[in-house]
Amino acid sequence: MNATEFPLLSALIWLPLLGALALGFIRNLRAAKWSALLIAGLELAVALFAVQSFRADSGNELQWVEHHVWIEHLHIEYFLGVDGVSILLLPLSALLTLVTLLATWNSVQRLPRFHLSLLLALEGITMGVFCAMDMMLFFLFWELTLPPIFFLIGLWGIGPGRRNAAIKYTLVMLFGGVALLFAIILLAFNHVNAIKGAVPNDLTFSLPALLATPLSGHWEAAVFLLLMLGFAVKAPLPPFHTWLPTVAMEGSTQMTALLTGLKLGVYGIIRFAMPLSPTAAVEYNWALGIIGAVTLIYGALVALQQSNLRRMLAYASISHIGLIIVGLSSLNMQGIQGALFQLVNFSVDASALMLIAGFIHHRLGSTERIHMGGLAKVMPRLTGFYFLFMLASLGVPGTNGFPAELLLIVSALTSHPSLAIAALAGAALSAAYMTSFTRRAFMGPTASAAVRQLQDLRPRELGVLCLLGALVISFGLWPNTVLENQRAAAEAWLNHLLEPPMQDGNDFDESVSKPDAGE
């Protein structure tokens, strides 16, 4: 593991958290807004520096490592690090927070400073989720995402049931958190049992140590099931998906853009669920494939029936998650690279489409298709960007969606024909629901006098969409920008699954269990 003297990852975590606290002492609203924007911009600059300094050929070697004892008696550590799986998610998370701040610059009238503080706090906590290499530290950050999201949905939602939506989201996430906590405890005790002559003091929650510890047969399936359950809730996968359409309709569109762009549940499946129980992941890859295919087709079919743009985008997001699961179940390089690429795309395409839905709702008071006819005539710039991000979500060549979806479909083709049929059917259904809704909502004659009076994109909104649109084109034309940063880590991930650590009695090497705290 590569350690550095400068605590760059701590800076990414604590800069927005401390900034969120500092905003409470700034009485002038204009000064608070510019301070929040400055903090978000500085956060993005630090994250870009981390990417620029990242050594892409390092495989699964952790970089920018920080390793300190935290709770000594429980062997819980403040252990941070990034590799090719998570490195690109840092600047994209920072960018998503920045554009959310710009998108809500003048639209939040109630408790605006508290809103800014919660957005910054959520940014810092999310960075902790991506950087934590101690399972208990990860679980802490994972659960800490709930309070800011609860208030962001409940206080600034746009639907009459926003408080119920916030409660529903929180309760569902707490259910998933219980499963995660049980899995983490099982992993820690399995580590103790795997060491010859171990005592309870050999307990550890270090991810590298747990990855190197083989799971005994009777615990492997249980850990895999618990981890998949915990992360499926957040992803979301059916039947735990109902919170996302509810939040999309009742919560603010900017909050939904964050939730659809930051796929923490899918990241958890890639980072923890499959690598920590590799034998079970390989043995039950057929079940993953079925879950992915059902999610893909189900989400697309339900999206095809929707008459509201926000709900349609929510089910489209669920359908795309199904394609990622299909790719992961294929257990090949195309599948894992396509899944990681699609994680990057969610932060751009899905969030941008939801922001556009928010711009429409703020002007029109509705995103129902019946109220939106003829938008292309009165809002040509917004319509143009909508078409760009829609084509990206469909995987049209020249956009960032094409290399990701191509890799995922190829991975399905090389693993099992039925998965390939599901992937291709999902792509066809995606084109159906997207083009059908777009034709009725944006084309044709204007639906009402209210539509004819709408204002097109304002300069700040135009800047936000231009920035995201530039990423769509650049990642689409130069996909190696993403793929090369992830290639070595994807190879290491796949090799770990196909060649998991072997257990020979109790001869597990204790030397891998406890990294040196000075690293």
Image (spheres, grey):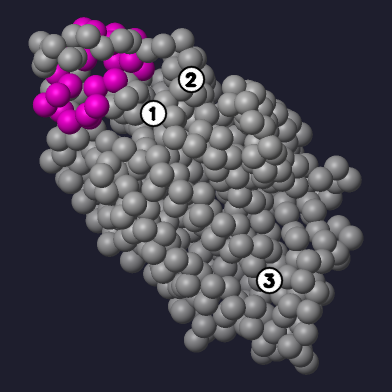
Name the dominant secondary structure of the magenta segment: helix
User: Is 450 included in the stretch rendered in magenta?
Assistant: no
Image spot of residue 33 (x, y percent): 59, 26
Residue drawn at the location 31% of the way across and 55% of the way down: 164
- Image side of residue 475 versus residue 408, left or right: right
Q: Are marks 1 and 3 in contact (CB under 8 Å)?
A: no
Circle 2: residue type: Val
The front one of 273 and 200 is 200
At mark 2, the secondary structure is helix
Q: Determine which quarter of the picture holds residue 7.
A: top right
Identify whether 397 is placed above or below 384. below
The range drawn in magenta is 363-385
* 1 or 3: tag closer to the N-terminus: 3
Callout 3 secondary element: loop
Earlier-in-chain disc, 2 versus 1: 1
Q: Check contact, mark 2 vs mark 1: CB within 8 A.
A: yes
Are there few (<14), some (14-19), or many (20+) residues within 10 Å of tag 3? many
Front of the two marks 3 and 2: 2
Q: Mark on residue 464?
A: 2
Q: Is residue 393 above or below residue 486?
A: above
The three-letter code of the residue at mark 1 reads: Leu
Q: In the rendered image, which residue does mark 1 sit on?
A: 355
Residue situated furthest front in the rendering: 27
- The CA span between labels 1 and 3 is 38 Å
The secondary element bearing badge 1 is classed as helix
Alpha carbons under labels 3 and 2: distance apart = 40 Å
Instruction: From the viewer's perspective, tell me whether residue 163 is left or right of residue 81.
Output: left
| Residue indicated by mark 3 | 205
Q: Quadrant of the N terminus?
A: bottom right
Q: Residue 429 is drawn in which quadrant? A: top left
